[in-house]
Image: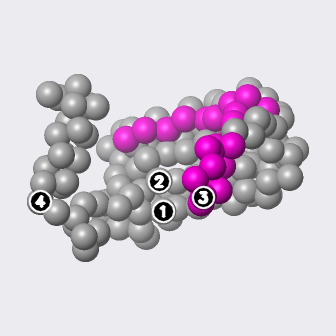
Amino acid sequence: MRFMVIVKTNETTDAQTPSAELLAEMGKFNEELVKAGVLLAGEGLAPSSEGARVVFSGTAEAPKVVDGPFTESKELVGGFWILECRDRDECVEWIKRMPNPEGQPGEVEIRRVAEASDFENMTPEVEALEGRLRAQAAGEA
């Protein structure tokens, strides 16, 4: 099973550059994840001041673009991992070991990545297309 691990940030930490200590600790943690064979991807994100949101109104109007920073947001994403674990419990155990050298309060969300079989309306044709696109994106085709 694949899991997306979403590392949350807030208005204060969104604008801060990670300390050298945090970067070193995260590097060690990422190395553990790689050695265990569970890390598929992982990155930190630039501050929301460099981002944009595309807002769909649900009507025929064109989507609206809102430039960052998103100072009023309570749930900013600061980074992510994609981990492959046998189940959610294993993923939780890994994330409980995530470094926090500065002792900051925070929250990390863990969500299972949906597979084609999770969608009851998935047709064999769309499932095959998704498989081809995934392989092509990975450089396999």
Pick whichever of labels 3 and 4 is earlier in the sequence: 3
Pick whichever of labels 2 and 4 is earlier in the sequence: 2
Instruction: Say if 122 sits above or below 7 in the image.
Output: below
Task: Specify the segment rendered in magenta.
Answer: 40-64
Query: Which amino acid is tagged 1?
Result: Arg
Question: Of helix, strand and loop, which one carries label 2?
Answer: strand
The residue shown at (49%, 38%) is: 42
Query: Which amino acid is tagged 3?
Result: Thr
Q: Check disc 3 and report the residue beneath it.
A: 59
Residue 65, how many percent across, how many down? Answer: 69, 39
Nearer to us in this view, 103 or 119:
119
Pick whichever of labels 2 and 3 is earlier in the sequence: 2
Q: Check disc 1 and report the residue beneath it.
A: 111
Judge the density around disc 4: few (<14), some (14-19), many (≥20) Cα neighbours within 10 Å: few
Q: Check disc 2 and report the residue beneath it.
A: 4
Contact, CB < 8 Å: mark 4 with mark 1?
Answer: no
| Location of residue 123 by image quarter | bottom left
Nearer to us in this view, 59 or 133:
59
